[in-house]
Each structure stands twice: as C-alpha cells, then as structure tokens.
Amino acid sequence: MKKYLLIGASAFVLGAGSMAYVSQQALASAQPRAKTYRMLGLFGDVLNTVENQYVTEVDDTKLIQAAIDGMLTSLDPHSGYLDPSDFDDMRDQTRGEYGGLGIEVTTEDGVVKVISPMDGTPAFKAGIKAGDYITAVNGESVLGLSVNDAVKQMRGRPGEAVTLTIAREKSDPFDVKLVREVIKPKSATARMEGDYGILRIGSFNEKTTDEAEEAFFELKAKNPKMKGLILDLRNNPGGLLDQAVGVSDLFLEGGEIVSQRGRDPRDVERYNARPGDITGGLPIVVLINSGSASAAEIVAGALQDRKRAELVGLTSFGKGSVQTVIPLRGGIDGALKLTTARYYTPSGRSIQKTGIEPNLEVALTREEAQAIANRSYQFSEASFRNALNADEGKVRRGAHEPAEAPPEAFDEKKDFQIARAMDVLKFGSVAATPKLPKPQPKLAGIIAKEKVAVVKPPPTTTQK
C-alpha cells in the first residue's frame, strides 16, 4: 500500500513541476497538426476542383483510392493501398490459388517490371524473365498505371488469352501470348540428381512449409542413401514471413532464425527454431540469385549465419523489409500494405538494398558473368529510387568479375550452378572445393578506357 502512495505522491510533484513544460509542448505539437489540417483542406480543394472542372465526369472513390495509394507508394516500393478487390486477390494468392498469369511484378518509374515468374505458370512457360518490362496488355499501354491496376489488366477468366508487350534489355519490344490459368503453383518440389536431392521452393504461400516437408520425405523414402541436399531458392520472389520461418525451422535444431525491428528500437520480435532437423544432419547447399527476395533471403540468411548451409550462386535481391497488411473496417474498404519493420539475420545483418552474398559466387551463363562485370548492380532492391536505405555505410557490391562461370567445354543444356553446388557437397565445403579458372569478361572500367582511347583526338601542334 505504501508503494502505491509513494508513487502517487511522486507523480503529483512531478506533474506540478512540469505544467509549464507540458503547455509549451502542447503549443509545439499543435503547429505541425495545424499544418496537417491545412494540407487536408488543400486535398479537399483539389478534389473539388477536379470534380467541377475536369474534362469528363470523375469517380470520387477511384480518385481518393488513387490518392491513398500514391501516398503509400511514395514511402517505399512495397507499401500501397489494396482496394477491396485487390485485397481479396491478395488473400487468394497467399492461400496458394488464384487466377492469372503467374508473374510477380512491381513498378519502377511508372513502368511495370517483372520481379520473377512463378514456377510452372503461363509466364514461366512463355519465357518471361526477371527484369523484363511489361509495357502493354492486349495492345493497351500500362505505362503510368499503379502495380495494382496493371495486375488487374493481366488477370481475367481462366482459358482466355492475353498478350503482353515485353521490353527487354538489348532486345526490340516483342509480344508474348499467354493463356490465363487458375494459378495453383506447387511451391515446393523435389527430385534427385545423382546422389543428391534438390528441393526447389518457388514461393512462400500458406502451404509452403508443409509442401517442402512432404516433398523431402517422399524423396528421402525413395532414396534413403541420399548424401546431401540442394535447396534451390533462385528466382523465388518471397511471400509470407511465417513460412520463411517454418522452412528454416525444418533444417535447424534450435536458435534464432530471424528478428524484425520496427520504428522503436525496443520493438524487437524474434523467431526461433525448434529442435528437429528433417534431414538428420545431411549437408546442405542453398542456391540463390538476384531474383531471390524477401522470405527467400530470410531462409538463406538464417542457414548461412547458423553455419547450417553454404550459399552458391549470385547476390540476392536485397529486400530486407517486412510489410504488414492492415484491413480497413474489416476489409470492407480494402487494406493498407505498409512497411512496418526491417528484418535481421541471426548475426544481426540487415540485407536491405545490399542483399546476401553467396559463399561461392557462380554465374549461370557466360553472358550473365559479362553482365555482372559491366553493370554496377543487377535488377535489385537498390534499383528502386525510393527504397529504404541500407544500414549506414553499406552499399551493394558494384561491377566485378564473378568468381566462376561455365567454361567453354561445359554442356549448356545442364545447370552450371547446380553442378557447382553438387561439387561443394561432394568436397564437403566451399573452401575444399577445387576452384575453376575465373572467366575473363571485360570490366566496365576497362571498356570505358578503351572507348576513350578510340575517340581521343590526336595531340594538337602549335606552329611557331
């Protein structure tokens, strides 16, 4: 009882002594609030002007929804507004079944850009690639549309054809005709290659952990002498955080998988593994590339930091943020998709913008090796102008010679990254794996110097 009284007395004295300070604070906080009210009034004025003076009649609901979406997308590339229809579509997608083409897209400077096609979908079968731009749907331009509006143009009844106009680097624009399907991508599949199992995870939806576990056990039952596992996360655009945690947990005996931290430094949420490694301790190699994003990076980062697996391939996409879907009025008015936290690997790394670097860098093709040498970065989170900043002082690795690329004698029908992953499993580690000669692509700096040498004018002479 005395404790409560002492606390009350202390609070009264503190309150009496700080009245002047509180009143000053109230005045200070009222100023930005007044500015906010003034700007909301400005919004109302603009809306009224558009309603009365625009060349055709306008839909107030669409205007306000577009304004909300514009406000959110100005924050970062992954925040946005989902109208009720988009919200329903998103829930269908995370449940692992929806209608469409099977493309993960974003917008960049008003242009729709492909993050990754999903395994086994019409887009995947048609050869659409990460980094492609979609400029038109059925001949109608989608330039300047929000990502949600562009997706609506691409979705429709299963069985109907749709034509996408694709712009790809070093190619003229071309059309791709696809037939919409009910997308039921199996997010996890498994197969054997030699003595090693390959578990492919193409995305993270509500079924992924269960599908991955089932696929592995079926493979192991048929191949009890399996010597190791390759976890293929290439071109995996991510998905649900709890599924990334679940997949990581399959291969760990305990300890932290990932943590997420919000605006308040004290607001930290940690996710830990439970005892039980479904492989029984088999060696693991994880394959990643620049299309491995978000949830895929959580899995790769956790297994790398916990020394459970080594990574082979190329630096990942670099999406180190977490989005929370916040229904508005129970979903009646749609939902906000809002970036609320950054995530950190077990060692405390934030990979925002920088990505996760593999233990053994391997390009899939010689052309890919050349591109890495000549560009400061591949299509990645760092490509977005309004992406969240990386940790202070951190930057994504610039143009460089990749450690390895397929030699001239390598059979192009085979997967060089999988071949090198199998080598790492065979020799026990990246350190013990014999290294191949480095490819000899010309670095951007060398090419620039050669161009300068070609166009350099002859020295001028002065007649005396």
Image: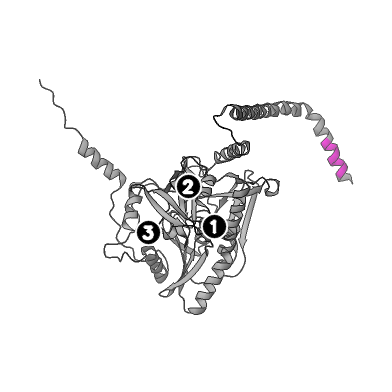
Gap between marks 1 and 3, in whole Å? 35 Å
Q: Which residue is mark 3?
A: 362
Residue pictured at 33% horizontal, 49% vertical: 373
Is residue 394 visible in the rendered image? The answer is no
Does residue 242 sit above or below 167 in this rendering? below
**Could you tell me which secondary element the residue under label 2 belongs to?**
helix
Residue pictured at 49% horizontal, 47% vertical: 106
Look at the image and give the residue range highlighted in magenta. 4-11
Residue that extends furthest to the left in the rendered view of this protein: 464
Does residue 192 sit above or below 132 in this rendering? below
What is the number of the mark on residue 99? 1
Gap between marks 2 and 1, in whole Å? 27 Å
- Viewer-proximal residue, 291 or 176? 176
Crowd band around label 1 with a 10 angstrom C-alpha radius: few (<14), some (14–19), many (20+)? some
Q: What is the x, y in percent for residue 236?
A: 48, 58
> Which SS does the magenta portion mostly show?
helix
Specify the amino acid type for callout 1.
Gly
Q: Which residue is mark 2?
A: 381
**Could you tell me which secondary element the residue under label 3 belongs to?**
loop
Residue mark closest to the camera, 2 vs 1:
1
* Tag 1 and tag 3, C-beta contact below 8 Å: no
* Tag 2 and tag 3, C-beta contact below 8 Å: no
**Could you tell me which secondary element the residue under label 1 belongs to?**
strand
Q: Is residue 464 left or right of residue 24?
A: left
